[in-house]
Image (cartoon, rainbow, N blue to C red):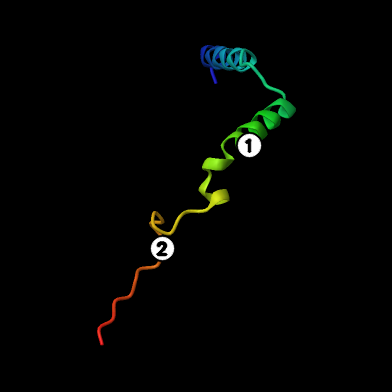
Amino acid sequence: MSGTANASAMRKMVQQLRLEASINRVKVSQAAADLKQFCMQNAQHDPLLTGISSSTNPFRPPKVCSFL
């Protein structure tokens, strides 16, 4: 690797490190608390928790029509 290529690679690495250092970080405990609060606020709209009415369920089994 030539000196110019090595210097260019080092500049890119420094630029990437500066970008990563400038990112605003959130503590895991704060992120978990925010996620828990969001889930509790939106629980009434979650079909996995409240269920889906049979009339609006797109995955309900098809009705069988039989003629006698």
45 relative to 27, above or below: below
- The picture places residue 53, in percent across and down from the top left corner, at 45, 55
Disc 1 target residue: 40
Mark seen at residue 13: none
- The picture places residue 26, in percent across and down from the top left corner, at 68, 22
- Horizontal side, residue 27 vs residue 60: left or right: right
- Mark 2–mark 1 Cα distance, whole angstroms, equals 28 Å
Local crowd size for mark 2, using a 10 Å CA cut-off: few (<14), some (14–19), many (≥20)? few
**Element type at mark 1:** helix
Q: Which residue: 71% across, 25% down?
A: 30
Q: Quadrant of the C terminus?
A: bottom left
Q: Quadrant of the N terminus?
A: top right
Amino acid at circle 2:
Arg
Disc 2 target residue: 60
Q: Quadrant of residue 21?
A: top right
Q: Which residue: 70% across, 30% down?
A: 33
34 relative to 8, above or below: below
Q: Quadrant of residue 56?
A: bottom left
Q: Nearer the viewer, residue 29 or 55?
A: 55
- The picture places residue 60, in percent across and down from the top left corner, at 41, 63
20 relative to 56, above or below: above
| The residue positioned farthest toward the left in the image shown | 67
Local crowd size for mark 1, using a 10 Å CA cut-off: few (<14), some (14–19), many (≥20)? few
**Element type at mark 2:** loop
- The picture places residue 20, in percent across and down from the top left corner, at 61, 18
Q: Quadrant of residue 35?
A: top right
